[in-house]
Amino acid sequence: MPDWLLQLLPQAALAASVYAGIRADLARLNERASHALESARAAHARIDNLKG
């Protein structure tokens, strides 16, 4: 196996793991933002019900 390929494989694995970590962080951030939006909508509905 060529030397350059042996050097490229660990770098490719590292890049893939960093990419997967970023995707997981973005998915978690999206979930938190969705939850915050739902909470804000519920709060607005409660305020609107108080006004009558």
Image: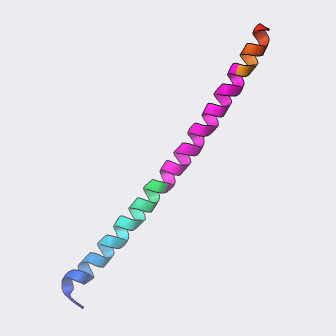
Asked whether, in this view, residue 14 is left or right of residue 44, the answer is: left
Identify the image quadrant of the N terminus.
Answer: bottom left
Q: How many numbered discs sit on the rendered protein? A: 0
Residue found at x 20% / y 88%: 2
Residue found at x 71% / y 26%: 42
The magenta stretch spans residue 32: yes
Asked whether, in this view, residue 33 is left or right of residue 46, the answer is: left
Specify the quadrant of the image occupied by residue 16.
Answer: bottom left
Q: Is residue 17 above or below residue 34?
A: below
Most distant residue in the bottom direction: 1
Q: Is residue 24 above or below residue 8?
A: above
Q: Is residue 15 above or below residue 44?
A: below
Residue found at x 78% / y 11%: 50
Asked whether, in this view, residue 9 is left or right of residue 36, the answer is: left
The magenta stretch spans residue 20: no
Most distant residue in the top direction: 51
Specify the quadrant of the image occupied by residue 17.
Answer: bottom left
Q: Main secondary structure of the magenta part?
A: helix
Rendering coords of residue 14 (x, y %): 36, 68
Residue interval drawn in magenta: 24-44
Asked whether, in this view, residue 2 is left or right of residue 18, the answer is: left
Rendering coords of residue 26 (x, y %): 48, 49
Q: Is residue 14 above or below residue 43?
A: below
Identify the image quadrant of the C terminus.
Answer: top right
Which color scheme does this rendered protein use?
Answer: rainbow
Residue found at x 72% / y 15%: 47
Rendering coords of residue 22 (x, y %): 43, 54
